[in-house]
């Protein structure tokens, strides 16, 4: 296992609650990539396991958004769910943040689904985790990865996806399916192929560029991204979305894949949460409708639309405290018992 150099100081975009303990952990996925994670444990549980090391508790693994790091939204979710009685980890996916993997700043629906499964591996053998009571939370693009993981890994007893993207759909079809044509995909393939040749010739990988330094003047969801990633609200120096963005050819593996092909065979519980005013709402609604189509196991599936919330409001609550913490707590308590 690769030995990672992890920052030991508190560098999150949220404050550590006095009721929660925190430490850095690592684990390795089936591609041999070592992942870095923040582990949160309620101090009440910590006290109990110190008195009786055989005690076991429910656990949740969290990742996302797409291009974010564990010090941002996923860490907030893990921290909050720990306050509510769960052992949690927020992990950086392969090739990003403090996790291993070269070339940097690339993604893969296969590897990133495996990242969730590796997190479940880690939790399954943790001495204080009940291996029959493990759930996951995927945010934004990692919502799609989480659903894919739930479709293949029966150890995942409950899955919540927040303000989700289907990254393979947007890679192939563009926003709102506006580029869903063979010609548009062909042009993408030509551009990606040329970029790969240039990268190989240069011996380095071109960065795709991130959000602009100045807030976009045109009102829309790119303003919402900027307001989260480029301000004190959510900025982090290791975050792709806060800085220079993905590798320019990072979308190659997404373009020819269908991430959610077998989600209608998920038997365990799923909660899909989206904002009413989120530009990405159609991803969550489509994923939910496809998941329950021809599925005998629909009674434990739920779609929740948060009134007035935008996409990024579910990253950290926004100004309206839009994240339904009580709902998440009840969902996992009900399905991890």
Image (cartoon, helix red, strand yellow):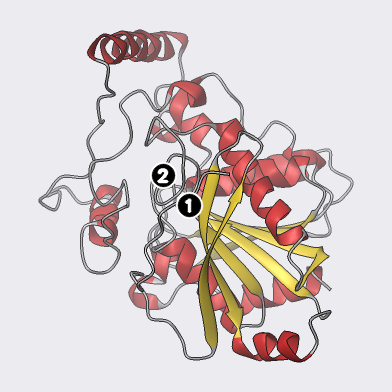
- Which image quadrant: the N terminus? top right
Residue 332 placement (x, y as % from top left): 72, 70
Residue 183 placement (x, y as % from top left): 40, 8
- Are discs 2 and 1 less than 8 Å apart at CB? yes
User: Are there few (<14), some (14-19), or many (20+) residues within 10 Å of tag 2?
Assistant: many
Q: Nearer the viewer, residue 77 or 273?
A: 77
Q: Residue furthest right?
A: 296
Residue sitting at x 39%, y 52%: 68
Q: Is residue 233 above or below residue 181?
A: below
Q: Does residue 294 appear left or right of residue 230 in this picture?
A: right
Q: Does residue 60 appear left or right of residue 168 in this picture?
A: right
Tell me the residue that label 2 is attached to: 96
- Which image quadrant: the C terminus? bottom right
Residue sitting at x 66%, y 85%: 46
Q: Is residue 164 in sight in this rendering?
A: no
Residue sitting at x 49%, y 45%: 141
Q: Disc 2 on helix, strand or loop? A: loop
């Amino acid at each position: 296992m690769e030995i990672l150099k992890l920052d030991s100081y508190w560098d999150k975009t949220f404050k550590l609650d006095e009721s929660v303990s925190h430490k850095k952990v690592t684990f390795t996925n089936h591609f041999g990539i070592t992942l870095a994670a923040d582990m949160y444990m309620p101090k009440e549980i910590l006290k109990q396991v110190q008195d009786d090391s055989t005690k076991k508790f429910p656990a949740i693994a969290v990742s996302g958004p797409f291009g974010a790091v564990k010090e941002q939204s996923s860490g907030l979710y893990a921290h909050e769910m720990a306050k509510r009685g769960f052992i949690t980890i927020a992990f950086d996916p392969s090739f990003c943040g403090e996790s291993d993997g070269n070339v940097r700043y690339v993604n893969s629906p296969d590897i990133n689904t495996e990242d969730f499964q590796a997190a479940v591996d880690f939790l399954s053998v943790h001495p204080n985790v009940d291996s029959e009571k493990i759930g996951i939370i995927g945010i934004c693009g990692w919502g799609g990865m989480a659903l894919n993981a739930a479709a293949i890994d029966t150890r995942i007893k409950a899955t919540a996806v927040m303000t989700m993207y289907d990254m393979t759909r947007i890679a192939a079809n563009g926003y709102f399916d506006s580029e869903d044509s063979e010609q548009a995909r062909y042009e993408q393939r030509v551009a990606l192929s040329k970029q790969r040749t240039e990268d190989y010739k240069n011996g380095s990988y071109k960065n795709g560029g991130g959000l602009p330094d100045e807030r976009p003047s045109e009102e829309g969801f790119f303003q919402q991204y900027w307001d989260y990633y480029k301000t004190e609200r959510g900025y982090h120096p290791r975050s792709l979305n806060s800085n220079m963005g993905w590798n320019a050819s990072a979308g190659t593996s997404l373009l020819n894949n269908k991430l959610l092909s077998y989600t209608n065979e998920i038997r365990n519980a799923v909660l899909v949460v989206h904002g009413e005013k989120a530009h990405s709402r159609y991803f969550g609604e489509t994923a939910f409708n496809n998941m329950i189509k021809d599925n005998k196991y629909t009674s434990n599936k739920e779609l929740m639309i948060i009134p007035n919330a935008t996409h990024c409001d579910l990253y950290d609550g926004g100004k309206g405290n839009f994240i339904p913490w009580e709902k998440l707590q009840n969902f996992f308590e009900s399905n991890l018992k």
